[in-house]
Amino acid sequence: MWFKKISQWWVLVLAFMLGGLLGMQPIHAATSTPASGFVLTPLLPKDQLDKQAGYFNLKVTPGSTRELKVSVSNPSKSAITLEVTPVNATTSDAGSVAYVPSNRQDPSATTTFKDMTSAGVTVQLAAHQAKTVGFTVTIPKNGFKGEVLGGLFVTNPTASATKPTNDQGFVLKNRYAEVTAVALWCQPQETIPVQLVLDQVKVTTDNGQPVLFAKLRNLAPTLFGQLTIQARVIDRATRKTVATQRLKSGSMAPNSWFNYHVALGSDRLAAGNYQLKLHLTSGTRVWNFSHNFTLTAQRASQHNHRLVGPHKVNWWLWGSLALVGLLALLMAAYWFGQRRSRKE
């Protein structure tokens, strides 16, 4: 299983799952002991929709229940305690699908993986022990449209992470974690178009620096990738573009949202009226959004104060100082010369 090193819960992007979900080749478990100190293996059923996928990809029946099982094993010489938790797939503010514990949920979702799945469990493993952990998924009587996407997230809540000795692990708030994705469908053949909207734009601060938060929402129960965003900030008075930004290879979970952060550029800005323009693509799909906003005097001052530009040499100033210094030396030499002549 492949992992990626990260530092915070909400920026986790588990590419080994997206590899299957977004059309990449499946990634298999590493043969060496992982840095996490435990191994998570999905026990995939025979009725998988995609036999090559390394995650749960299942057609479910409205009103039915379904068992999902994973194996957790402890290859170390010490006992460990693991927490296995169902999580919903969300979209991080980096513009990528994330499978981590989160309360981020879009109201457009009629149901979620957590809503349908039994609660998380704590598992104690002795040295070199393995156990099977099961979860019951209860499908709503009326079913659901599109895809419900989530995962089974496993972490050791007491372990302190050390620096990985190879690239097989990721750090998660001083802990390691693994996750197996779960994709559920009532009608796998049904195609539901993406419904992407710009919900709001606001000026806020990130580490004391004013930035724009553009909240983008995917209102459809559809996962999509290949997302690119081209952002421009325009001065409405001069129609001049004062800042640009670009996102490549993004993705969004079904019925999810994220705040796309847009910096205000590296030039000084005056308080006034501005416009944010967004051009988004995903494959052949195209969206264009625009939103007017006001940059207050306070925000403009914060932005201008924190600008860090290239150091420019003021040659006129230094030339003038050098000339003044030279004249001072000449006058001092003349004065001392005259004084010496009078003494002689």
Image: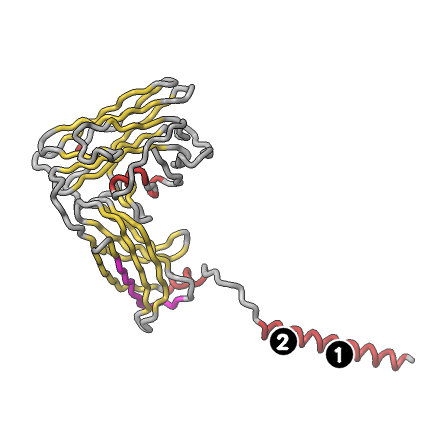
Assign a secondary structure to mark 1. helix
- Quadrant where the C terminus sits is bottom right
Question: Total number of numbered labels?
Answer: 2
Residue type at mark 2 is Ser
Q: Nearer the viewer, mark 2 or mark 1?
A: 2
First-in-chain label (2 vs 1): 2
Identify the residue shown where x is 34% and y is 41%.
Answer: 12
Q: Nearer the viewer, residue 245 or 318?
A: 245
Q: CA distance from mark 2 to mark 1?
A: 16 Å
Dot 1: within a 10 Å radius of its alpha carbon, few (fewer than 14), some, or many (20 or more) residues?
few
- Look at the picture and state if 221 lies above or below 36: below
Residue type at mark 1 is Met
Q: Is residue 102 visible?
A: no
Q: Which residues are magenta?
A: 269-280
- Look at the picture and state if 212 lies above or below 128: below
Identify the residue shown where x is 23% and y is 26%.
Answer: 69
Which residue, given by chain and number where applicable, does mark 2 sit on? 320
Quadrant in which residue 97 is drawn: top left
Q: Are marks 2 and 1 in contact (CB under 8 Å)?
A: no
User: x, y percentage for residue 129?
Assistant: 35, 18
Which residue, given by chain and number where applicable, does mark 1 sit on? 331
Q: Main secondary structure of the magenta part?
A: strand
Quadrant in which residue 293 is drawn: bottom left
User: x, y percentage for residue 272?
Assistant: 33, 68
Q: Is residue 252 visible?
A: yes
Q: Nearer the viewer, residue 333 or 12?
A: 12
Dot 2: within a 10 Å radius of its alpha carbon, few (fewer than 14), some, or many (20 or more) residues?
few
Q: Determine whether, in the image, residue 124 is placed left or right of residue 188.
A: right
User: x, y percentage for residue 213?
Assistant: 31, 55
Q: Is residue 204 magenta?
A: no
- Look at the picture and state if 132 lies above or below 212: above
Q: Is residue 272 magenta?
A: yes
